[in-house]
Image (cartoon, grey):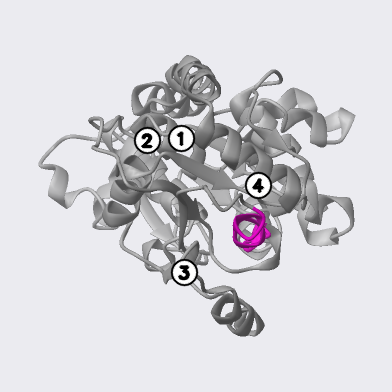
Amino acid sequence: MGFSVYAQFFASGWGTAWLGYIPAMRIVLVTPYLLDARNGNAHTAARWSRFLRRAGHAVEMVREWDGREADGMIVLHARRSHASLAAYTGRYPERPLLLILTGTDIYRDIQFDADAMDSLRLAHRLVVLQERGVAALPDALRAKARVIYQSAPTLKPAAKPVRTFDVCVVAHLREEKDPFRAAYASRLLPVASRIRVRHVGGLLQAEMEAEARALESPRWHWLGALPHGETRRRIARGHLLVISSRMEGGANVICEAVAAGTPVLASDIAGNVGMLGEDYAGYFPLGDEAALAELMWRAESDPAFLDLLQRQCAARAPLFTPEREAAAVKALLEEFS
């Protein structure tokens, strides 16, 4: 970066707070969801912003690019953020443009949406959030793909309830999450089961509220949206976490469960397998509440099976550390230095 860019940086007001320390780059991070959304994409954007700042970059996080000059752009969501991505590369075609791909991007939108496909073409790097994500991309674009796992800080082991076997579900109520699968599975459990399912997640599709209310029972209860810290504490206190999604780019809730020492039962989809590994013992067929109920009961009633899930999750834990993710983000930017 030449002197003229540094001068523009300070003239724009970005650098005044740094008291003479000059970040390597000014980066605009475009995300359709800021932290008030309390979803996985918002947390991804917030983490990347922290990592980039700690690496010495100046970062502005916005929903849409307003045309302000920047040395590079990072975009979350190929379809929703296409307008910002296309405008930036149109004005600054040689400056770094990195695209973080979500689950709906790689497992739906890039199959048919023109904006999403154009975003793949325009971006200089494509970031997928688990090891199977690269295979979902067109062959011609895989060379510019990088795998960067999401992360969560390790939590101290939390005391688990002794009178109940608590299962946590963390998913907003929307179709892609298949959010009620654990609720239906809970109805199939043996009478002797002590399982209690608690579901954390906001209402994103209004038509799902009636179904959620109808499913309420001593076995399953919908808590609505909770602050991130409280959600993490509930995951840590649970005996299991269930993720039943139809599509995931690389679910951060899996990282949070693993970091808390809480084993996972997951739908057998590419995004979950890319996080937990091919041989993980806790998969169930997508949409199959009977199979999920069987796994939930087995985890409750068979200590050896629960221990196996815990050991397999612990083996994946080194992939999901903040230190590893921060180093990968830093290395990605260094490809353009």
Give the residue number, with chain letter if any, for mark 1: 255
What's under tag 1, amino acid-wise? Cys
- The local secondary structure at tag 3 comes to strand
Ranked by sequence position, the earlier of labels 1 and 2 is: 2
Q: Residue at x 58, y 40 (%)?
A: 297
Q: Residue at x 31, y 43 (%)?
A: 237
The crowding category of the residue bearing disc 3, from other C-alpha atoms within 10 Å (few below 14, some 14 to 19, many at least 20), is some
Q: Position of residue 126 (x, y in %)?
A: 66, 36
Give the residue number, with chain letter if any, for mark 3: 222
Give above or below for 236 relative to 39.
above
Spatial CA span between label 1 and label 4: 23 Å
Magenta-colored span: 177-188
Give the residue number, with chain letter if any, for mark 4: 293
Spatial CA span between label 2 and label 4: 28 Å
Q: Residue at x 59, y 73 (%)?
A: 215
Spatial CA span between label 1 and label 2: 6 Å
- The local secondary structure at tag 1 comes to helix
